[in-house]
Image (spheres, grey):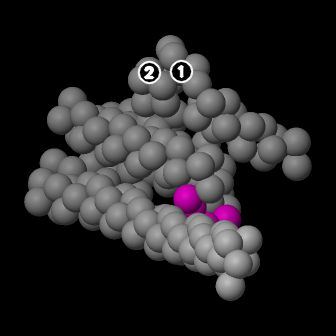
Amino acid sequence: MTHERWRIAVEGVGLFALVGSLFFVGMQMRQDRSVALADLTYARNELFINRFSAGLASETYLDAYAKLYSTQGWDTTGFTAREAAAIEIDAMLWWSYLEVTYRHHAQGLVDPDEWATWEANVRMVQQWPAYNAVLDKFWRPSPSDFTRAVDQIRSSVRES
């Protein structure tokens, strides 16, 4: 073989190696994204489970929830200070969980069907004064893309 043919052969092998390594990097990135999605799902579910585990261990929390369910309006009027605090803490955890889920949704990391369920939950919570008070008290003073998304979801209820 002449020097020119050797050069062409080596360049061809180099090109093949480059394409192969890019393919490998792409597959690795895809796998890393799958692992990240699994980790995010686990973390969100752990937060949600911890929220209810703490509640089930608290008599005050259970009493407060029993009153809320009996009013069916989620209004804390007539609650003791401890019961109202338990509901406020639960509402804070719910909004925090929703914000984390929203941020993951905005990054394309939440399944569209799962996000649609959360949108329905936001519309439902709109009817609950205790939860709205927490949103107004802790999230509204610093408007963000999250609070704008909540407002957009809620306004779609009023328009329909």
In the picture as drawn, the residue positioned furthest to the right comes out as: 160
Q: Amino acid at mark 2?
A: Lys
Neighbours of disc 1 within 10 Å: few (<14), some (14-19), many (20+): some
User: Residue at label 1?
Assistant: 140
Q: Nearer the viewer, residue 18 or 73?
A: 18
Q: Is residue 129 left or right of residue 92?
A: right
Q: Which quadrant holds residue 93?
A: top left
Residue 160 visible in the shown view? yes
Q: Is residue 108 above or below residue 82?
A: below
Q: Secondary structure at mark 2?
A: helix
Q: Nearer the viewer, residue 82 or 146?
A: 146
Q: Secondary structure at mark 1?
A: loop
Front disc: 1 or 2: 1
Residue 55 % position (x, y): 21, 56
Residue 135 % position (x, y): 49, 30
What residue is rendered at 47% in x and 70% in y?
Answer: 28
Residue 124 % position (x, y): 61, 52
Q: Is residue 152 left or right of residue 95?
A: right
What residue is rendered at 28% in x and 39% in y?
Answer: 89
Q: Nearer the viewer, residue 128 or 117?
A: 117
Give the residues in magenta. 109-114
Residue 19 visible in the shown view? no
Neighbours of disc 2 within 10 Å: few (<14), some (14-19), many (20+): few
Residue 139 % position (x, y): 48, 25
Which mark is on residue 137? 2
Q: Amino acid at mark 1?
A: Arg
Q: Is residue 91 left or right of residue 55?
A: right
Q: Is residue 5 above or below residue 75?
A: below
